[in-house]
Image (cartoon, rainbow, N blue to C red):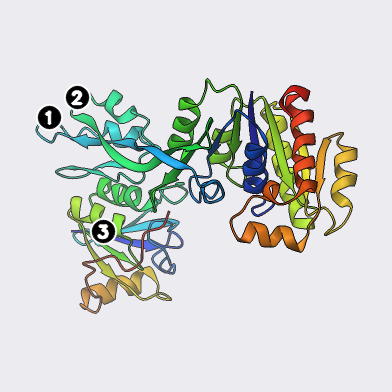
């Protein structure tokens, strides 16, 4: 079963929920797909046993074969390849690696070469748990390829938790695609609700089942609960804001290692999402 | 010789455009026939890589020189590849005034990008 944890708004507790659910389960794999700013590993103190470069490809033009016909430039939607007067310019950072320019080139002058755009780190946590996270190279345009790779190497896991990136753009869609269930980490503020509405829209469009955990539930207002009721969205749990929790998280420690209250909430969420046998 | 000028509208008395690749029009002045022609800038609504595409548009119009407000690094690379020289005008002038200033050698040649590339 694949469970994605997402939020829309940043800072609502995706990573907190991910790492504490991970620690509450016996046999589980977690992937941190927030490759622009991965954080989960900072809570888990895993042991890195493998690192893997992730490449993207971009075109290289053989100017002995190129006739400057212009087909490649006409084809490219991102203006990453521009046939000029005596040569063809390639802007590798604009390239989305679709392979189209190579296909349309009538003289086979285009080949593809690799460029490292990021890394995946494989970690073992405790005796039988696995944690993987990706890291996008600074300045690179998209982490989708890294996210897809993270999901591909973990596709056979019995229970997979996916810590998703914030927002509702390509990276988030890539991270939730193919999930059996999604957990929205929400907060009861006007900002949290506003961003959550976009996530709900996204999940409904993707036809994915989901429920909501309201974090910092004693702050803000009641609008989020009214919204959940109106929209018939399942409330999986509430986590109160407490100063001690903020301090525990600020030290990079797990709430479940310190709080019976949070342990119970995590177990309840697990029961609701995975069933009694896993809690 | 053909000179391209970034224009906000399609007459010689229009103001020059404040941006290069997102300029609404390109004016092309032909120094042999002394005529102006105006072309829609088909690069202006591109999601990415507008700079390179705008240069391609100008290259296809057989422009030898362009008068521009600012240029990013990709536009400079593309202009070099199309063997088009670029000169920088100050904003607030008309297309015709910018052209006169070029002929009076008042506009500095641009050899490097004047603004950083965007994502």
**Residue A190 horizontal side relative to residue A127, left or right:** right
For this rendering, which residue is in front, A238 or A45? A45
Q: Do marks 2 and 1 share a subunit?
A: yes
Residue A179 position within the rendered picture, expressed as x and y whole percent measured from the top left: 63, 27
Q: Residue furthest front?
A: A127
Q: Is mark 3 on a helix, strand or loop?
A: helix
Residue at point 15% right, 32% down?
A66
Q: Chain letter of disc 2?
A: A
The dot on residue B76 is 3
Instruction: Say which quarter of the image contains residue A142.
Output: top left
Q: Where is residue B68 in the image (x, y as percent from the top left)?
A: 33, 65
In the rendered image of this protein, does residue B98 appear above or below residue B81?
below
Mark 2 or 1 closer to N-term? 1
Residue at numbered disc 1: A65
The secondary element bearing badge 1 is classed as: loop
Q: Residue furthest left?
A: A64
Q: Where is residue A84 in the image (x, y as percent from the top left)?
A: 21, 44
Left or right: A15 with respect to A52? Answer: right
Dot 2 corresponds to which residue? A108
Q: Can residue B29 be seen from the camera position used here?
A: yes
* Nearer to the camera, A1 or A86: A1
Q: Residue at horizontal 71%, vertical 37%?
A: A183
Badge 1: few (under 14), some or many (20 or more) residues near its Cα, within 10 Å? few
Marks 2 & 1, CB-CB < 8 Å contact: yes
Q: What element carries label 2?
A: loop
Report the residue at 59% width, 40% height from top: A163
């Amino acid at each position: 079963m694949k469970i994605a944890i997402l939020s829309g708004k940043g800072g609502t507790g995706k990573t907190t929920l991910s790492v504490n659910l991970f620690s509450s389960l016996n046999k589980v794999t977690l992937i941190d797909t927030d490759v622009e700013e991965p954080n989960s590993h900072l809570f888990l103190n895993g042991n890195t046993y493998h690192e893997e470069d992730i490449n993207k490809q971009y075109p290289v033009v053989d100017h002995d074969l190129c006739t400057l016909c212009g087909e490649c430039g006409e084809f490219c939607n991102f203006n990453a390849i521009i046939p000029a007067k005596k040569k063809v310019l390639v802007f590798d950072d604009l390239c989305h690696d679709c392979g189209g320019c190579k296909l349309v080139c009538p003289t086979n002058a285009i080949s593809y070469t690799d460029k490292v755009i990021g890394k995946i780190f494989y970690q073992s946590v405790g005796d039988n748990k696995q944690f993987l996270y990706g890291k996008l190279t600074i300045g690179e345009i998209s982490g989708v390829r890294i996210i897809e790779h993270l999901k591909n190497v973990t596709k056979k896991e019995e229970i997979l938790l996916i810590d998703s990136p914030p927002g509702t753009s390509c990276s988030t869609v890539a991270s939730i695609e193919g999930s059996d269930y999604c957990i929205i980490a929400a907060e009861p503020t006007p900002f949290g609700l506003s961003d959550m509405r976009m996530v709900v829209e996204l999940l409904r469009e993707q036809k994915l089942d989901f429920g909501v955990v309201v974090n910092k539930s004693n702050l803000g207002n009641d609008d989020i609960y009214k919204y959940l009721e109106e929209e018939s969205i399942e409330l999986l749990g509430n986590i109160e804001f407490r100063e001690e929790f903020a301090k525990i998280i600020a030290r990079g420690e797990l709430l479940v290692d310190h709080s019976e209250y949070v342990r119970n909430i995590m177990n309840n969420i697990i029961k609701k999402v995975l069933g009694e046998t896993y809690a | 010789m053909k000179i391209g000028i970034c224009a906000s509208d399609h007459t010689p008395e229009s103001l020059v455009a404040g941006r290069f690749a997102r300029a609404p029009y390109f004016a092309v002045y032909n120094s042999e026939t002394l005529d102006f022609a105006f072309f829609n800038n088909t690069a202006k609504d591109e999601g990415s890589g507008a700079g390179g595409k705008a240069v391609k548009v100008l290259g296809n119009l057989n422009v030898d020189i362009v008068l521009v407000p600012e240029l990013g690094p990709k536009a400079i690379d593309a202009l070099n590849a199309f063997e088009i020289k670029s000169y920088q005008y100050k904003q607030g002038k008309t297309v015709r005034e910018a052209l006169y200033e070029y002929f009076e050698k008042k506009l500095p040649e641009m050899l490097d990008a004047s603004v950083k590339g965007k994502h």
